[in-house]
Amino acid sequence: MTYVPHETHYAGTDWQQSSGPQIDRKVHLTDLWPTTDTASVAKDPIVDGLHPVMAIGGQTTLDGRPENATGVDKTYNADATMAVMNVASKVIVRAYVTNILTYDPGQAAATYEATPNIGMPVYVDDSSDLGAGCTLSLSPLNDESPGLPNPLAGWLFYCQDEYQDFEVGGPNESSDWPKTWVEGEYLVCVMLTNATGQAWYDALKLVVDTKT
């Protein structure tokens, strides 16, 4: 199958899939990534009404990656180049996520997840394979050589209309999960987190070290 990237960030009115929590913080555009200003590849410019999930702070391991705070863009002031980010853990949002699992270092995507399920970790990914409107993948490392660890953004989760025989849009005969995906980028719900922590980084480093 041909990988079809999304060229614009999600702007649907249903981007918020939970009523909270809400912890809003103003962040300068230059401190957010991946964006047009910071990514090695072009991204859809941030404007008010778009709601990408992004990392805050350094984009290199020397600057603290991957223990970045992460959040979802709620509003954007172009005059001040300032975004209001909801940085609360456990808020649920709709976003485009690619099912890329791994990259060949310094090259293109190597493997893809075919049957994603609830609870799979989702990462902020600045790799070049992602479309201009997609900032999230299932890969813990980006496509550089050697791969840089990606900040944990959250986990795949239910949208309001994906519960079995319950909630909005029902009754559904069964849950919409697990999915069946081919190579591509999908509009799904992600439960966000800011709990990356040193323990997660140490565990990832152990995995990477054992493979090199």
Image (spheres, rainbow, N blue to C red):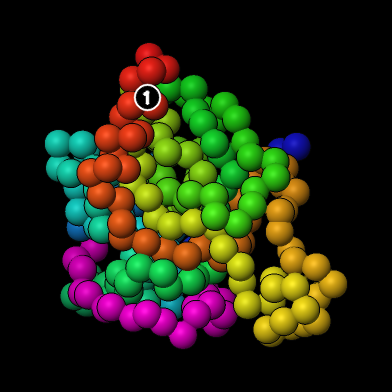
Q: Is residue 15 magenta?
A: yes
Q: Which residues are magenta?
A: 10-30
Residue 46 horizontal/vertical position (percent): 36, 66
Q: Which residue is mark 1?
A: 208
Number of marks in picture: 1
Q: Is residue 94 above or below residue 135?
A: below
Residue at the image position 51 percent from the left and 44 percent from the top? 138
Residue at the image position 18 percent from the left and 44 percent from the top? 64
Q: Quadrant of the C terminus?
A: top left
Residue 83 horizontal/vertical position (percent): 27, 72
> Farthest residue toward the left?
62
Q: Is residue 63 above or below residue 160?
A: above
Q: Is residue 92 above or below residue 202?
A: below
Work out whether residue 125 can be spotted: yes
Which residue is at the front of the view, 156 or 30?
A: 156
Which residue is at the front of the view, 171 or 12?
A: 171
Q: Is residue 156 magenta?
A: no
Q: Quadrant of the N terminus?
A: top right
Residue 210 horizontal/vertical position (percent): 38, 18
